[in-house]
Amino acid sequence: MKCSLVSLIAINSDKIPKENINSIIEILNKLTDNDLVLFAGWTLATKFDLDEVIKENNNNITTFVLEVGDGYRGDKEDDFGFYVVRGKEIIKSAIKQIFMDSSIMDFHEENKPIKNIKKLIDELNEKRYFNINDKNIRLIICGEHNILKSKKDKDYKAQFRFEEDTELNNQFQAIVQKTDIFLNPAHTRMGEEHILQKKLSYLSQHLKLCLFTANKYLTKDHQHYLFRDGEEEKGKIKEVNKKYKITTIEIN
């Protein structure tokens, strides 16, 4: 199974470049031997742009994951969110980011952390789940990886944020156990990379894979991470140009 991470050049959440449409079509039509392509967030401005990509996509084999609109304010539009598409068929649509950072606060409903954790766990069971080549795949959007926390006094080792809640912890651990590949597309490069890496490592433990990609933004470069069985792998840089970066990994 061949997977690729793709990041583009981001301007900001309100101005997603129209030229992304042509870049995405170009990428999909050249990665015809791929099983999966994961794009970073802020991929396309509107659902009409996605329709254009699907129309011009001649690659009927590859499953690709990308975002329409602004993930942070995605609830303003029904068609905003992440999409999973195979060839010309939309498999999953308008998956919206629930929370952004370690405060675990919904952007519009403050001080309800447990509610947001439960919502994400519910979505990971069904809405965020799909399958490729008998691999169970789940989508965690941008800062939602903060469903995990890092223990500074234990070398920043990651663990479930509400481990003391036995029911929630058991539900989350069951999801982790049933997942082969976690996808974590972000919008722009994240800081505290040592903590991010611990969380990606956690999600990839026990022979799993975790893929992370973030766009180039202002002075911040592209950010690609591939973790397998708890360890980082570099993958193969397939292409870097003025419009995008592609990193590829092969898995069994």
Image (spheres, rainbow, N blue to C red):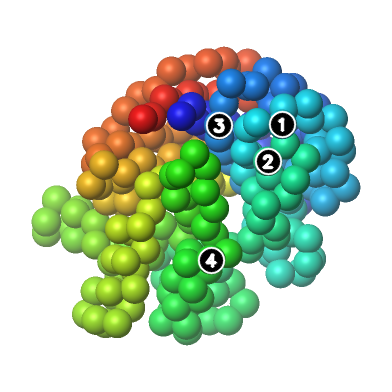
- Residue 210 quadrant: top left
Q: Residue at x 49, y 39 (%)?
A: 133
**Mark 1 lies on residue:** 60
> Around disc 1, counting alpha carbons within 10 Å, would you say few (fewer than 14), some (14 to 19), or many (20 or more)?
some
The reply to whether residue 67 is visible in this rendering is no
Image coords of residue 232 (percent x, y): 29, 33
Along the line of sight, the residue nearer the viewer: 32 or 202: 32
Q: Is mark 2 on a helix, strand or loop?
A: strand
Identify the mark nearer the N-term, 1 or 4: 1
**Mark 2 lies on residue:** 86
Q: Does residue 95 appear left or right of residue 122 in this picture?
A: right
> Around disc 2, counting alpha carbons within 10 Å, would you say few (fewer than 14), some (14 to 19), or many (20 or more)?
many
Q: What element carries label 3?
A: loop
Q: Distance between the residues labelled 1 and 3?
A: 10 Å
- Residue 207 quadrant: top left
Q: Which amino acid does label 1 sit on?
A: Asn
Q: Does residue 127 appear left or right of residue 167 in this picture?
A: right
Q: Distance between the residues labelled 4 and 3?
A: 21 Å
Q: Which residue is drawn at 58% across and 46% down?
A: 187
Q: What residue type is labelled 3?
A: Asp
Along the line of sight, the residue nearer the viewer: 33 or 128: 33
**Mark 4 lies on residue:** 126
Instruction: Please report contact status of discs 3 and 2: CB closer than 8 Å, yes or no.
Output: no
Identify the mark nearer the N-term, 1 or 2: 1
Identify the mark nearer the N-term, 3 or 2: 3
The reply to whether residue 185 is visible in this rendering is yes
Q: Which amino acid does label 2 sit on?
A: Arg
Q: How far apart are marks 1 and 4 (CA)?
A: 24 Å
Instruction: Please report contact status of discs 1 and 3: CB closer than 8 Å, yes or no.
Output: no
Residue 126, above or below 14: below
Q: What element carries label 1?
A: loop
**Mark 3 lies on residue:** 35
